[in-house]
Amino acid sequence: MKGLILAAGRGSRLLPISATRAKHAVPVAGQPIIAHAVQSLRDAGITDIGIVCSPSSETDLRDATHSSGHLTFIRQREALGTGHAVLSARAFLENQPTLLYLGDNLFQDRLTPMLSTLRDADAVIGVKQVPNPQAYGVAIVKNGRLLRLVEKPRKPESNLAACGVFSFGPALLEYVQDLLPSDRGEIEFPQALSALMAAGGQVRAVEFSGFWSDAGTPDDLLNANTFFLSRLQPRIEGRVDRSVVTGPVVIEAGAAVEDSVITGPVWIGPHALVRGATIGPGVSIGAHARVDSARVHASLIDDFARVLHPTLPLYRSLIGRHALVTAPSDTGLQMVIGDRSVMRM
């Protein structure tokens, strides 16, 4: 069984965070999204994993997975859709069954049912009940069997969203090969499932019950960050002085916490400095970041960011790498706000 992660997309819904790096390299609870994806495949027993990347995202993804073991990187030179991305990896797949993972998804549940269910089907799709199915590709399922897929219907027939994970036998690639571009001009992998079913093939559905997110928007990313922080095992390897630390808190080696109150779940990355602050719950602070005299709750502060003496608490905030959040000057607010940024004053 091969594992294939698609991670060539730009991530426009996550701008401006994704403007300077691949969205799959953005951290969730201190670990890049792509590293969570690799671990999900490893936990399912898959050791031979390929990552489809773009020429511009490859370096970011290699850096983000440097501690994830051996991986094969496959370039998709043009952004022509998920089906095209799968075909780009055809040589890597070597005519073997495949577990396909859209790389911005995050799962609580193990993916092993995707493998066992494939024994009695030509392909398998993962689905999840959602409150807003009209925002997703919707799966109509009967007795565990997929009947059809409908992309973002106005009036959904089902509340089951296709949640970005598939398994399939090698014969499905022939259907992918024969696909025509969609209205968006892309080769859409899920259309191959419809073609397979039209030819008499059987596609089964595996329903996941635990947490799932596609981490596609800032709100999604913050929700995922909060969830995965809640699963932390407490560990303090950094320095804690004159501070109160309660709940599941991880303070990585080289980090320092001084004169602060930390209420878990919280993750503080290597060589970060937290001083005179009230942090948590639900906060991750990246490597080499600095938080001084601030109140921060349910937020993600990325590597090398600085939060210095803000006059108001930070709540559900997403602060990118090397960003600066600080108090106004004597002359008033001073802002550098990039494309697609959000500020609430």
Image: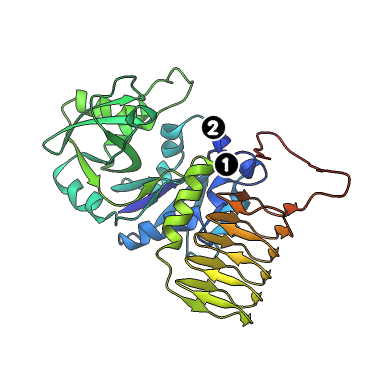
| Mark 1 secondary-structure assignment | loop
Q: Residue at coordinates 34% horizontally, 51% vertically from top-left?
A: 211
Amino acid type of the residue that numbered disc 2 sits on in the rendered structure:
Ala
User: Residue 20: image x %, image y %?
Assistant: 67, 45
| Mark 2 secondary-structure assignment | loop
Quick check: 326 left or right of 256?
right
Mark 2 neighbour class, 10 Å CA radius: few under 14, some 14 to 19, many 20 or more: some
Relative to 254, residue 228 above or below: above
Quick check: 231 left or right of 195?
right
User: Residue 270: image x %, image y %?
Assistant: 62, 71
Residue closest to the eye, 12 or 89:
12
Q: Residue furthest right?
A: 331
Residue that badge 2 annotates: 79
Q: Are marks 1 and 2 in contact (CB under 8 Å)?
A: yes
Relative to 46, residue 16 above or below: above
Classify residue 44 by image quadrant. bottom left
Classify residue 148 by image quadrant. top left
Quick check: 318 left or right of 151?
right
**Can you see residue 56?**
no
Is the C terminus in the top left, top right, bottom left or bottom right quadrant?
top right
Residue that badge 1 annotates: 54
**Can you see residue 102?**
yes
Amino acid type of the residue that numbered disc 1 sits on in the rendered structure:
Ser
Relative to 120, residue 160 above or below: above
**Total numbered badges shown on the rendered structure:** 2
Q: Residue furthest top?
A: 183
Is the N terminus in the top left, top right, bottom left or bottom right quadrant?
bottom left
